[in-house]
Every structure is written in structure tokens, then in C-alpha cells.
Image (spheres, coloured by chain):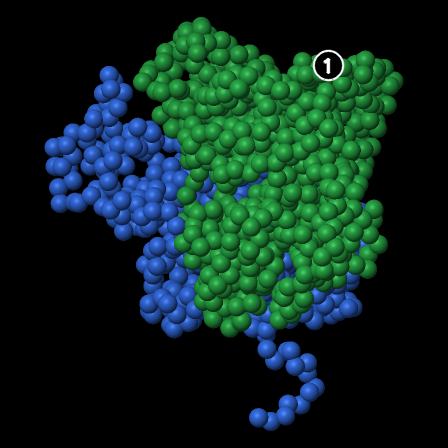
Chain colours: A blue, B green
């Protein structure tokens, strides 16, 4: 054994993870806890209902290169996967020494989709943190603003052909300089958006959140020393990468090809679907995701930037392997092939405001679908798609007397699973911890009335394990006329079933159903005039089924009949179960012979495996 | 210094999952303590067993008999409640099934949604509609009432002890339809218990209100039977005095009244511990404290600000099933002495949330448990004395503890002792993270807080937690394992009331706010007076207004200055210019509070009130749990080898808590043992016996505050 030259600290040669696994764990939790603290502040202080009640926000910590270090337990998954791209994009965009641009105490705003963002509505606040006079990393908070300007209330405009029609773009700009708030910057932004009071509260909340995160990081560094913290930040990334590679090594080698279709290009005359395509190749402990088989960009707003596509892929991988801490290591474990200029990787100025209903969920589906082939116990059949709806107008009620913008996105069903009982109604997968907006809050805040909010019978994809049910909300304006816009997908293609499981019923959005004025709103509607009292009827789908419906255990079909999840007709049509309702017994009576005839050649499948996570 | 009113016995009982504890304070300050095994099948049996053993004569002078109970909690957790029907506004029948659609695990695709308490085929939609401003859009007709009654009759035919919950949209603004339904059901199906949301939880957010109401109905028959059993036993014993149960808000309800609104006693058992925690915090002049009640399977964390327990509007029995009532703000973490250590697939050590429970228990119990637990780790580290567990009533097997830890040690490549240290560290880190969130979620900085630690396992870990979090002092009450029962004896009588009143503070519409607050305070005091067993005692009332910036969705409660009631029970109602002044001060208070919590204020943004609240309080007479004589026996101090940190064995001083005298100090490393708990004082810390009999633990170099 030779003598080592002692010009580097000897502790550097062995990682913290080996040297002190406990402290490693402690620090990893400490970082996540800081993001959770930021989340708690954001939710309680925010003004937008979609943030405070809906949970459309996220927070992260990155290192000085923008690599993701930590996220929290309540962040909107769709955002947080883009956070590292936001920082990396900014670092490239500013083109100067980051330490000159980002001074201690600065807060920089950005919502530019083409600088590592999503769509203009997601406004981010980024704050640097310095250790011992050197830039150490960034704290970021992202929030969906209900409106970011443009000619459509709520900003979603499926007819927009470019970024210029999608509201106010904010490239990096200092809203706080070395601790001093810059009112002119916030005035410029707020002058361009509807419901500016709401936006102002949200903006101040974002600033409060990143400042909190920064001060907590300083405290952490004081306690453990900056060297230790910086080393740990690097190792968190290695750790997650190691874990994910170890999982890849357990998978069978080889390619899997999957495709997800979007309904169509909203700005094209063609009715042809658009294809998102992925070739996933596992080789040893490496995995490659190749999206180059995807279609060229759409003219309309369903496209996504590179950051959104990678966020969708990575966040869904995290769902397949939920035990792996979410950080840049998850990105690094995967080799991405994503040439620029595709539907899934558009560049400025292609329109992207509908990415959250278009490419984003389609890419999530690609990963879910690929893993239904590779490790079905970790994945699920197709979950519900999304419709963003905006009901807007003037609110003349006493005390309001203002323009209002009601942004509503619905929930639907998640897909059937290989080793779980039927799935339930939930938010879309990429929205995960988001919550619905209570009717009692919406009717107070906006001049609307909800007629119903219910799960739709027979709307789930049938299967041995069925999907969750889809949901219908019906509402109308109570005090005056207004306009309606929406941006969605999945009117043509319902969430997909797997292994014989059926697809779920697709999206449907109708204005004034059953009247002479009935209009199929569809998925791409801009400023449709709507009259007071005329019903809006929006159905968001359930989840696809898993396994052959004819193998679903009859007892579960009867249970679903009792619960009203399926109809007598649905039981017969979808599951081959013939039953009639007996009013006296107040129960459903199985016709054993007729059922056996319809199910001929199909054995009942096994009972759902009991609890326990995979 | 302890005393009991009228020289009569005050009896408090806490029925926990493992043990039932009794504390009785008698004439002249005599205190009797009992700990017996719980009898979950018949909760009353262990209670009266403990009473018998305490040898308190029920026919003698008894002032009060008060219980903290988990009967309603367990009915909800174990799903043993009534077959329940939900009546709701037509079109919204799925409110319990759609829920809030969020999930506990952000990335968990294999999640299974919480099952509501009412099956979907037992929901009845009723044609009626009330709007956000309280006006009626669709009236509830007589024909519709008849139809709904018939439906309920059909659904409940053949049910054993069914119950009905009614929750209609906007009933918190206008309860008329709910009341009409309740009356119609009462008339047609008399005896069928009915819970209506405008009485149970008059708050907005239809899911939270409906679920709370469903829970109330669900536990009604069970609580009624339990209350009946208790009353029969108490009658048979001819026990005198006032008989009550502790409520989730820390107040009391007379046993016969409990079944009327049983959802109020869901946190009865937890409340007892927190009340005692707050009591001991006050006893050592701690204005800001976090309470940590750590037992075998879980740890309950509460927050005390300005000497007062905090209240929350929400508690989740299981994720997605909230109870939306003003209840003591408590957060339960799956970390206890029985939490199991394992290695995750990434090779890292993980502790909990799985627990070995009471059976088979930690490996060292020798009851068949083989998984390494936090308790086993403490035995291996020498912090727990195997020969003095439960005061020597149970022997722990140190060898078993060690063998259970060995496999984990092999995987980590550490010695068993260092592995034990690691297990305790990770467990502490889990609690640390949760406690940070508990405080920060509420806009509080934990670094300004003391930590009051009790329950069997709390004092063993508290100082390490406090050190890690940078908290102030650690306070260990006397008899840490009996603190909850003690809480039932010392709980104040209190009534909390809340009304929704949405007003803009910058508008004339807020003129009626001070008057409404005064009336609410009057009513709250009146309700408390009607419960008091000694009407001459003073009553305090505090009032608050929950506010937010117009457009914000969450509110903060602002304590209001006026409205303290003197004994003659009169309130000054500010009117005219005074009212305007009151509203202005309220607004100012909101700006300041908001800035402190969230880092900014918006002086030009209108503020809106959301609800008004009042709390009427009648303080219980002071009681000291154990008048120590200070039995210092002069024997030489004993020491034991204890692992203080990884690889760091020290000779720790071992002291029996019963022998410590007020004012005595012990420098760490030290282990202080008593019958129901063990306190670990790490090196660099000093424990001082406070005159309240609490141990106060602080850094040796810090100035110990009296």
C-alpha cells in the first residue's frame, strides 16, 4: 500500500453514503422537508383556487448547474420534472457569469416554455442560494396562474398558431434584487393579466416560498457545514441513478415499441390523429427512450417542448419505481433520444398552451404502456385524459362586480391493474396530488351553479380488474352571458385497456344538451358565447380495464350492479353476466345458465391479490 | 400543594389500546394511580377493574368521573359502526366517493382509495337546492319529503341499529331543508338516529362536511350503547359526582349527552394526553412547546402557543376521510417503540411505519417477535434497563434484542451496537421531519419551542430530537406513562362554537361583525354555564375571527381583544364608531399575522372574514399529580455502559426518578428510570428537577431557566 498524497481531504475518497449512511438519509429527508415547508406556505397563502384548493403548484431545489436535488410530497408532478430544465435553460439564456446575474437575495421570474418551461400559465420564481460567497444552487416555485393574458380568458387558446397568441411570455427577469422588491416588474406583468389581484397574491406567495426555502437551506448549511451539504447534493443524484439502474438490470433486455394517439391537430383541417411514439430499449442496467418516431409538430396548441416530454417520461418512471428519490439521478439513468422539431419537442414559436392535455399525458401513457409489457405489476392500464375548461364573463353580484375566469379541470378514472382491485376516481396521473374544487367554493366565488357532479354508470373500462369511473359535471351561468374555452384530448380515443381489458368511454363536452342550441364543444373551443342558464355538460373518462372482462369474478360484477357502477345492460354487454333486479328482495338475481352461456370458454379469474404494495 | 374541590375524589381514566390508566386525586391531595391491561371488547370492564383496584369508594365523596375513550375512534378505524344512510342534494350523490381525489403517495400507482363509511347504494338524493347566499332555488316539497322517508324506510328495513346522515349543499348557510328532513324522519321513523350536517359541522366544502356527518351517524349507535353501559355500571356502583367523557376539543360532555353528537369524542383519548402536556408546559412557564406522546406504535404530536393548545379544523381518521371539526390539533406519526427496522432495496436503513405492536411486540419482549424494533435498539445501547421495564413487572431479553438486530448489522456492515444507534437515529429523523412539518404547516418556527415528552417511549428520545431540531428545552412530566389519564382529571370545562360570517372588512357590510361576535360569545358562555357542576366558578371567553385576503382560500384566526367576560356574564358590544375601530384593529392584526407567517402583507388588499369563533372556558382546579417527598436514600450512584453515539460508549449515571429531589441536577450521560418510562440525558445535557416535579433538560452550558 502506497502513501497517499494528502492534497485532497481524505473523506472525499469515500462517499457520504458509505461513510455515514445515516447522515446521508438525514440530509436527504432534510432537503425534501424544506420543499414541503415551501409547499405548505404556497397552499395556504395562494390566491388562485386552482393553486390553494387544486394544488397546481410545485417546488424544488437544484444545484448550481440546475440538476434537480429535491422535491416534496405535495408537488404537481407535471411541473417538477421541468424545473431542472428551467434552471439549465436560464443559465444558458443569460449568457453571463451566473454569479453576476444571480445575486444573493435575488428572485427571478420566468414562464417561458422554450426556456425549459411548460406553458405560459405556469409562472416560476427562482432564487439562488449562496454558501460561503459562492453560488451553490437554486430554489424554485412554480404555480399555475389562472390567466396570463392574451385574447382568451384563462389564456388557453387552441386556435393560436404560435406562442404570440398564448399570453404574456416572461423570460428571466428580476422581481427582487438583493432583497429589494421591484414594483415596476410586477406592475408590467400584472397589467397584462386578468384578475390581477389574484395574480399579485400568487406572485407574492411564490416569492415568500422561495425565500423560506433559501433561509432553510442556509440553516442546514450552518448546521452541517457547506462542504458536507454540497457533497451530499451530488451523492443524492448518484444514489437515485444507482437505484434506477439496479431496477433496469432486473428487467428483461430488449426493445418495446409503444404509441399514443392524440385526437387531431386542432388548427388543421385534417382529422388525422397525431402520434407520440417511443422505442424503449433495456440493455443491462441501461435504458434508452427514443421518441424520434413521433409525428412532426401540430399547427395547434397540443405540442410540447422538450422539457415537458422529458418531465412526463421521468415522472412516470418515478411512479413505476416509487421508492427511488426524485432527483436528477432519475433523468441520468435514462438515455433520451429526442430530436428537436417534433410534436414532442417543438421549439419557439410553436404553440404549446394545451401541452398538459395533449403531449404530456400521452407521454405518461407511453411509459405506462411500455411497463405493462415489462413489469405489469408496477403499472396500470390507461388513466383518464384531461380537459381544461375556462368559463368566463362578468360577475355582477354585489361585492364582486368584476371580470371572472373560472378554470376547471375534472378528474376521472385510473386504469385497471394486474395485482390490485378495481381502480378508483382520481386526478390525472400527472396531476396526482392536485385536488378537486368544491362546488361550495366555486358557486361562492363565481356566478355559476352546478347541476350535478357524479360518477357515470358504465363509464369505466371493463376488465378482470376494471378502471375507475369517469365523472360528469354540469354547470351554467347564473347572472349573465359569458364565454367558454377548452383545451383537451381524448374525444376520439378513450383510455386504453390492457391484456384484454376494454377501453373506457371517451371525453365528451356539450353545450345546451337536449335543446335546439345544442353544440358539441369538443376538445378545442375558443371563446364560445354561452348564455345564462344554458347547461354545460362535461364528461371526463374513466380508466381502461385490465384483463378479460369475461373473467371478472361474478360476485364483483354483482357488487358493481348493487353499487350502481354498472347497469344491468352493461353487466350483460361488457361482462357476460345476466342478472335482473328483484324489487322484493331489493337485490340482483343472477341468471346462472344465461351467464354460463355468455361466458362459455372463459373461467372466472382469480380473486384480487390482497393489499401490500408491489 | 395539591387539593381537590370539596375534598372529594376526582377520578380520571384513559382507555388506550394496550393499557387502561386511572388517576384519582382525593381529599388532602392523596393520589392513586392504576395501570391495567385494556379489554378492547368491553372497554368498560378494564375501567371498572382499575377503579376497583384503586380502592376509591365510589359511594364516598366523588366530585367527578371523567374518561378519555377511543371507542368512537376504534369504531371508525375498525369499521364497526352502524349501517348508515346518506341523504344529499340530488345530483351530488357521489360526494363521498369522488372525495377530494388526492392521494397520500404522490407517485403511488398501486394505491387503493379509502372506502367511504356509507355504501353507494345507501345514498338518497333529494330534490332541493339552496344557493351560496342561502336563498332557496328549489323548495323541498311535502311529496319529496314523503318519498325520501319511504326510501330510507326501504333501505334500512332489516338493518340492525341503522343511522342516517343528512348533508345538503350550502346547509351551512341555510339549514332549513336539513331540519325539515330530520323532523320528517323523526316523525315517521322515530328512534332512528339522524345526524344533520348543519349541526354536526356547519362549514363549507361539501365533501369534508358530508364525510364528518356520515362519521357522526356511523358511530352513533355504538357510542349510545357504550354510554348506556357506563351509566348502568355507575348507577350500580352508586357513584356520585359528575360523569363525563372528554371531547376532541379538550372539553367535556356529560355521558348521557355524548350520543347526541358522538363525532365530538373521536379524539377523546388523544385529547387527554395533550391537555396534560399543555398543563406541564405551563407548569414550567413554557409559552411555546411541542408535545410528543410516544407509545408503542405511534407518536402524537401537538403544538402549544402562548401556553394554549392549538386547534385544527381537520383530522383524518385515514387518508382521505377527514373529520372537519374544531378539535385539538394533533398529528399522529407511525413512529413508536415498536417500529420495525429494515433495509430497503437501495441498501439503506428504514424504520417504521410497520410496528410490532403490543403483540408479538419487540424481540426483547420474548413474546415471539423477531423483527428488530426501536425498543430493541435502546436495550442494545444500554439506554433501557432490561430488569426495570414497567418498574420490573416485565423483564426484557437483551440477547433476543441483539439477535434481532444482527441481520441488519450484517447488511450495513456495522456492529450491532452501532446499528442500534442507527435505528434510533433514523427513527428520530422520522419524528423530526414530521414535527417540522407540524409546526411549519402552522406558520410556527420550531426553534423557539420546548419539547414536552411523555408516553412510555417519549422521554427516551426527546432530547436527541430537540437537539437535532435546535429546539429549546425538553420537559418530562412526572409519571410520563400516565400523563393521559392525568389529563382527564385536569381538563378544563370548555365549549367551542363557530359560525360562518363572510364580510369584507373594508365595507359597511362588516358593521354587524362585532355584534355577531358578541352574541356568539354570549351563547357559548351560556352553553358552558348549563354544563357546569359548580355554577359559581368563573368563566372566561375568548373570541377570534378567521380572516383572509379577498380571493385567498385559506384563512388565519385572529384573536380579538374585546369580549372577555367577567363573572357577572356581561359583554360590552361595540357599536357605531367603536365597531369601526374594532374592525380596523382586526384588519391590522391580520396584516401583521400574515406577514409573520408567509413573508408578505398586502395593505391595500381587502380582507374578508370567513368565520367567527368563541371559546368559553372554566378552569379545572389545580392538581399536582405526585407530591414527591424526595426520598433520597443516600446510596452511591450507579453507572451503566451506554452507547451515546456511534462507537461512543460512556458510563452513564443511573438514577431512580422517585429518589430525585426538587432542584437536584443530573449531568448527562444519565439514564433516569421510573416505573412507566425511562429518560435519556445525553452527554452535554443537564436534567434539573423543577418544583412541578417535571424534569427540565437543557444543554449544560445553557442557563437553566427556573
Find residue B634 and report its horizontal and vertical position in percent: 74, 55
Q: To which quarter of the image does residue B690 belong?
A: top right
Task: Determine the chain carrying the residue at label 1.
Answer: B
Label 1 sits on residue? B535
Looking at the picture, tell me which residue is in the foreground, B154 or B302: B302
Find residue A118 and report its horizontal and vertical position in percent: 57, 53
Find residue A536 and report its horizontal and vertical position in percent: 47, 28
Please indicate whether residue B611 sits to the left or right of residue B701 in the image: left
Please indicate whether residue A118 sits to the left or right of residue A268 in the image: right
Residue in the picture at 60% in, 94% down: A2
Residue in the picture at 82% in, 32% down: B588
Looking at the picture, tell me which residue is in the foreground, A543 or A507: A543
Residue in the picture at 34% in, 43% down: A421
**A72 shown above or below B623:** below
Please indicate whether residue B682 sits to the left or right of residue B97 in the image: right
Find residue B226 and report its horizontal and vertical position in percent: 48, 23
Looking at the picture, tell me which residue is in the foreground, B153 or B564: B564
Amino acid at each position: 500500500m502506497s502513501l497517499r498524497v494528502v492534497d485532497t481531504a481524505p473523506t472525499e475518497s469515500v462517499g457520504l453514503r458509505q461513510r455515514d449512511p445515516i447522515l446521508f438519509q438525514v440530509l436527504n429527508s432534510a432537503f425534501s422537508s424544506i420543499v414541503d415547508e415551501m409547499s405548505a406556505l404556497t397552499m395556504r397563502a395562494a390566491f388562485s383556487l386552482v393553486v390553494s384548493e387544486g394544488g397546481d403548484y410545485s417546488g424544488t431545489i437544484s444545484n448550481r448547474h440546475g440538476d434537480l436535488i429535491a422535491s416534496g410530497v405535495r408537488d404537481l408532478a407535471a411541473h417538477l420534472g421541468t424545473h431542472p430544465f428551467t434552471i439549465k435553460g436560464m443559465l444558458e439564456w443569460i449568457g453571463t457569469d451566473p454569479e453576476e446575474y444571480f445575486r444573493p437575495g435575488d428572485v427571478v421570474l420566468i414562464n417561458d416554455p422554450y426556456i425549459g418551461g411548460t406553458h405560459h400559465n405556469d409562472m416560476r420564481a427562482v432564487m439562488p442560494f449562496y454558501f460561503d460567497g459562492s453560488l451553490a444552487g437554486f430554489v424554485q416555485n412554480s404555480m399555475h396562474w389562472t390567466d396570463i393574458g392574451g385574447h382568451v380568458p384563462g389564456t388557453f387558446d387552441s386556435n393560436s398558431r404560435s406562442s404570440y397568441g398564448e399570453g404574456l411570455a416572461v423570460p428571466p427577469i428580476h422581481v427582487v434584487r438583493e432583497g429589494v422588491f421591484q414594483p415596476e416588474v410586477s406592475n408590467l406583468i400584472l397589467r397584462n393579466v386578468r384578475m390581477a389581484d389574484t395574480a399579485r397574491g400568487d406572485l407574492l406567495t411564490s416569492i415568500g416560498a422561495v425565500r423560506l426555502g433559501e433561509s432553510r437551506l442556509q440553516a442546514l448549511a450552518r448546521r452541517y457545514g457547506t462542504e458536507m451539504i454540497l457533497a451530499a447534493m451530488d451523492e443524492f443524484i448518484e444514489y437515485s441513478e444507482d437505484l434506477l439502474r439496479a431496477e433496469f438490470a432486473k428487467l428483461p433486455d430488449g426493445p418495446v415499441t409503444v404509441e399514443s394517439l392524440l385526437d387531431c391537430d386542432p388548427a388543421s383541417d385534417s382529422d388525422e390523429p397525431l402520434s407520440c411514439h417511443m422505442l424503449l430499449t433495456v440493455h443491462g442496467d441501461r435504458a434508452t427512450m427514443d421518441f424520434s418516431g413521433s409525428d412532426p409538430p401540430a399547427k395547434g396548441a397540443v405540442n410540447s417542448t422538450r422539457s415537458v416530454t422529458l418531465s412526463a417520461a421521468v415522472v412516470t418512471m418515478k411512479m413505476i419505481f416509487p421508492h427511488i428519490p426524485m432527483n436528477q439521478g432519475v433523468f441520468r439513468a435514462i438515455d433520451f433520444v429526442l430530436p428537436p422539431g417534433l410534436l414532442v419537442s417543438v421549439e419557439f414559436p410553436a404553440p404549446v398552451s394545451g401541452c398538459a392535455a395533449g403531449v404530456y399525458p400521452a407521454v405518461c401513457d407511453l411509459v405506462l404502456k411500455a411497463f405493462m409489457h415489462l413489469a405489469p405489476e408496477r403499472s396500470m392500464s390507461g388513466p383518464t385524459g384531461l380537459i381544461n375548461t375556462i368559463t368566463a364573463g362578468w360577475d355582477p353580484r354585489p361585492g364582486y362586480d368584476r371580470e371572472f375566469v373560472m378554470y376547471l379541470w375534472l378528474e376521472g378514472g385510473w386504469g385497471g391493474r394486474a395485482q390490485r382491485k378495481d381502480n378508483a376516481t382520481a386526478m390525472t396521473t400527472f396531476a396526482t396530488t392536485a385536488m378537486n374544487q368544491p362546488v361550495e367554493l366555486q358557486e361562492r366565488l363565481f356566478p355559476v351553479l352546478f347541476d350535478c357532479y357524479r360518477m357515470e354508470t358504465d363509464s369505466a373500462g371493463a376488465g378482470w380488474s376494471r378502471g375507475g369511473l369517469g365523472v360528469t359535471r354540469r354547470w351554467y351561468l347564473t347572472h349573465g352571458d359569458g364565454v367558454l374555452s377548452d383545451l383537451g384530448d381524448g374525444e376520439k380515443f378513450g383510455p386504453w385497456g390492457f391484456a384484454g381489458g376494454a377501453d373506457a368511454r371517451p371525453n365528451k363536452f356539450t353545450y345546451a344538451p337536449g335543446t335546439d342550441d345544442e353544440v358539441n364543444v369538443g376538445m378545442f373551443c375558443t371563446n364560445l358565447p354561452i348564455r345564462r342558464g344554458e347547461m354545460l355538460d362535461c364528461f371526463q373518462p374513466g380508466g381502461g380495464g385490465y384483463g378479460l372482462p369475461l373473467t371478472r369474478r361474478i360476485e364483483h360484477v354483482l357488487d358493481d350492479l348493487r353499487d350502481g357502477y354498472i347497469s344491468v345492460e352493461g353487466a350483460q354487454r361488457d361482462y357476460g353476466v345476466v342478472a335482473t333486479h328483484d324489487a322484493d328482495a331489493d337485490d340482483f338475481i343472477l341468471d346462472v345458465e344465461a351467464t354460463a352461456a355468455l361466458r362459455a370458454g372463459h373461467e372466472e379469474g382469480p380473486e384480487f391479490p390482497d393489499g401490500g404494495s408491489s | 400543594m395539591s387539593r381537590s374541590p370539596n375534598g372529594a375524589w376526582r377520578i380520571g381514566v384513559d382507555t388506550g389500546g394496550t393499557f387502561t390508566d386511572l388517576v384519582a386525586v382525593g381529599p388532602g391531595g392523596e393520589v392513586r394511580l392504576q395501570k391495567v391491561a385494556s379489554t378492547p371488547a368491553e372497554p368498560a370492564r378494564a375501567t371498572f377493574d382499575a377503579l376497583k383496584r384503586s380502592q376509591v369508594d365510589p359511594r364516598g365523596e366523588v366530585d367527578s368521573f371523567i374518561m378519555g375513550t377511543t371507542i368512537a375512534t376504534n369504531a371508525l378505524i375498525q369499521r364497526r359502526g352502524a349501517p348508515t344512510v346518506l341523504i344529499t342534494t340530488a345530483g351530488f350523490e357521489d360526494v363521498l366517493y369522488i372525495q377530494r381525489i388526492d392521494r397520500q403517495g404522490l407517485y403511488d400507482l398501486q394505491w387503493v382509495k379509502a372506502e367511504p363509511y356509507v355504501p353507494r347504494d345507501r345514498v338518497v338524493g333529494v330534490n332541493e337546492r339552496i344557493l351560496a347566499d342561502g336563498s332557496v332555488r328549489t323548495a323541498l316539497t311535502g311529496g319529496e319529503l314523503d318519498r325520501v322517508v319511504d326510501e330510507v324506510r326501504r333501505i334500512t328495513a332489516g338493518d340492525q341499529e341503522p343511522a342516517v346522515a343528512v348533508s345538503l349543499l350550502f346547509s351551512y348557510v341555510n339549514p332549513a331543508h336539513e331540519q325539515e328532513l330530520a323532523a320528517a324522519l323523526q316523525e315517521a321513523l322515530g328512534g332512528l338516529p339522524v345526524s344533520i350536517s348543519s349541526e354536526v359541522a356547519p362549514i363549507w366544502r361539501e365533501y369534508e362536511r358530508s364525510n364528518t356527518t356520515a362519521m357522526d351517524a356511523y358511530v352513533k349507535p355504538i357510542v349510545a350503547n357504550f354510554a348506556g353501559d357506563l351509566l348502568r355500571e355507575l348507577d350500580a356502583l352508586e357513584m356520585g359526582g359528575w360523569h363525563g367523557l372528554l371531547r376532541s376539543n379538550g372539553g367535556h360532555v356529560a355521558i348521557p349527552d355524548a350520543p347526541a353528537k358522538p363525532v365530538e369524542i373521536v379524539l377523546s383519548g388523544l385529547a387527554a394526553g395533550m391537555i396534560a402536556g399543555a398543563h406541564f408546559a405551563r407548569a414550567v412557564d413554557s409559552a411555546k412547546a411541542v408535545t410528543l406522546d410516544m407509545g408503542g406504535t405511534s407518536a402524537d404530536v401537538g403544538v402549544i402557543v402562548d401556553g394554549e393548545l392549538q386547534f385544527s379544523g381537520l383530522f383524518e381518521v385515514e387518508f382521505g376521510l377527514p373529520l372537519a371539526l374544531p378539535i385539538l390539533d394533533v398529528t399522529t406519526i407511525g413512529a413508536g417503540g415498536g417500529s420495525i427496522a429494515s433495509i430497503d432495496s437501495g441498501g439503506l436503513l428504514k424504520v417504521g411505519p410497520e410496528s410490532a405492536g403490543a403483540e408479538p411486540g419487540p424481540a426483547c419482549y420474548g413474546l415471539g417477535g423477531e423483527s428488530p424494533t426501536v425498543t430493541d435498539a435502546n436495550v442494545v445501547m444500554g439506554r433501557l434497563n432490561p430488569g426495570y421495564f414497567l418498574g420490573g413487572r416485565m423483564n426484557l431479553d437483551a440477547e433476543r434484542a441483539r439477535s434481532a438486530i444482527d441481520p441488519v448489522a450484517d447488511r450495513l456492515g456495522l456492529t450491532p451496537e452501532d446499528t442500534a444507534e442507527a435505528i434510533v437515529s433514523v427513527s428520530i429523523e422520522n419524528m423530526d421531519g414530521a414535527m417540522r412539518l407540524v409546526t411549519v404547516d402552522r406558520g410556527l418556527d420550531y426553534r423557539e419551542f420546548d419539547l414536552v415528552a411523555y408516553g412510555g417511549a417519549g422521554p427516551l428520545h426527546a432530547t436527541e430530537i430537540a437537539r437535532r431540531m435546535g429546539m429549546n428545552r425538553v420537559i418530562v412530566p412526572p409519571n410520563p406513562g400516565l400523563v393521559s389519564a392525568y389529563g382527564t382529571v385536569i381538563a378544563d370545562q370548555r365549549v367551542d362554537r363557530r359560525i360562518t360570517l363572510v364580510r369584507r372588512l373594508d365595507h359597511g357590510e362588516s358593521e354587524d361583525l362585532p355584534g355577531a361576535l358578541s352574541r356568539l360569545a354570549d351563547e357559548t358562555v351560556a352553553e358552558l354555564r348549563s354544563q357546569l357542576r359548580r355554577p359559581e366558578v368563573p368563566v372566561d371567553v375568548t373570541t377570534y375571527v378567521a380572516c383572509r385576503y379577498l380571493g385567498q382560500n385559506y384563512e388565519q384566526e385572529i384573536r380579538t381583544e374585546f369580549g372577555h367576560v367577567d363573572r357577572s356574564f356581561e359583554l360590552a358590544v361595540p357599536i357605531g364608531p367603536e365597531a369601526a375601530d374594532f374592525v380596523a384593529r382586526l384588519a391590522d392584526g391580520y396584516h401583521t399575522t400574515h406577514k409573520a407567517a408567509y413573508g408578505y402583507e398586502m395593505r391595500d388588499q381587502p380582507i374578508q372574514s370567513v368565520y367567527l369563533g368563541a371559546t368559553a372556558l372554566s378552569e379545572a382546579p389545580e392538581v399536582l399529580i405526585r407530591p414527591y417527598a424526595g426520598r433520597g436514600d443516600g446510596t452511591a450512584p450507579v453507572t451503566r455502559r451506554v452507547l451515546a453515539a456511534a462507537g461512543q460508549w460512556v458510563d452513564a449515571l443511573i438514577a431512580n426518578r422517585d429518589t430525585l429531589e426538587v432542584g437536584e441536577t443530573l449531568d448527562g450521560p444519565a439514564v433516569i428510570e421510573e416505573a412507566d418510562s425511562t429518560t435519556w440525558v445525553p452527554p452535554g445535557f443537564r436534567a434539573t428537577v423543577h418544583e412541578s416535579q417535571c424534569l427540565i433538560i437543557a444543554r449544560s452550558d445553557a442557563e437553566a431557566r427556573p
